[in-house]
Image (cartoon, rainbow, N blue to C red):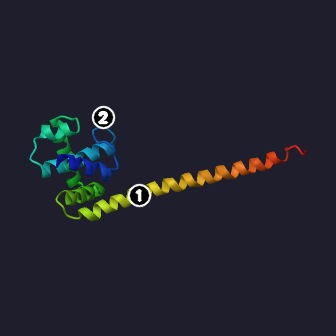
Amino acid sequence: MIERIKKLVEQETKIKNIESRLRTQEMVDARTLFFVLALRHTKLSYERIAKVVNRDHSTVVHAQKIYTQWRQNSELFIPHLRTLQNLDDIVVGRKQEVKVNRLTIDRLTNENNLLRKQKEELFKTIERQQERIEQLKKYEPIW
């Protein structure tokens, strides 16, 4: 269950590995989501939960404080609380298919956009090469 929660958080936040030593705000928020969900849905100790992402128990305690701040200032942290609610629904089995499908659609849309950009760049390269060929034809010897 704990690994499933970790993967869901990584998918939702589009972070490849929340075990990273980075302390960017996005990474801290993702780990906070993970810790809150893990505490809600598992009976593991703080230490066991923290070890999943290579941290110690005090990080889990700190995450609880961050979550309390999110709830106290909910208007500032609406996106985080919505994400937490969506993940909470998935973990308990509600909306699972819809959420996974939305994540898949988002991922495929991003890949499609990247492929379109690559295609455009390749067409531009082909166009430049054809222009260069036409320029060089002027210098072909006539036998």
Which percent across, then down, holds residue 33? 23, 49
Residue 80 found in image quarter: bottom left
Decide which of 67, 10 is in the foreground and name it.
10
For the residues marked 1 and 2, what is the alpha-carbon distance in whole angstroms?
A: 28 Å
Question: What residue did someone put label 2 on?
Answer: 21
In screen coordinates, is 125 left or right of 47? right
Q: In this view, does 37 lie above or below 55?
A: below
Mark linked to residue 108: 1
Label 2: few (<14), some or many (≥20) within 10 Å?
Answer: few
Nearer the viewer's eye, disc 1 or disc 2? 1
Which percent across, then down, holds residue 82? 26, 59
Which percent across, then down, holds residue 130? 72, 51
Residue 86 found in image quarter: bottom left
Residue drawn at point x = 38 percent, y = 59 percent: 106
Secondary element under disc 1, as helix, strand or loop, is helix
Which residue is most to the front? 143
Decide which of 118, 37 is in the foreground and name it.
118
Residue 18 found in image quarter: top left
Which percent across, then down, holds residue 132? 75, 47
Query: Disc 1 residue type?
Result: Leu
Which residue is most to the right? 143
Secondary element under disc 2, as helix, strand or loop, is loop
Label 1: few (<14), some or many (≥20) within 10 Å?
Answer: few
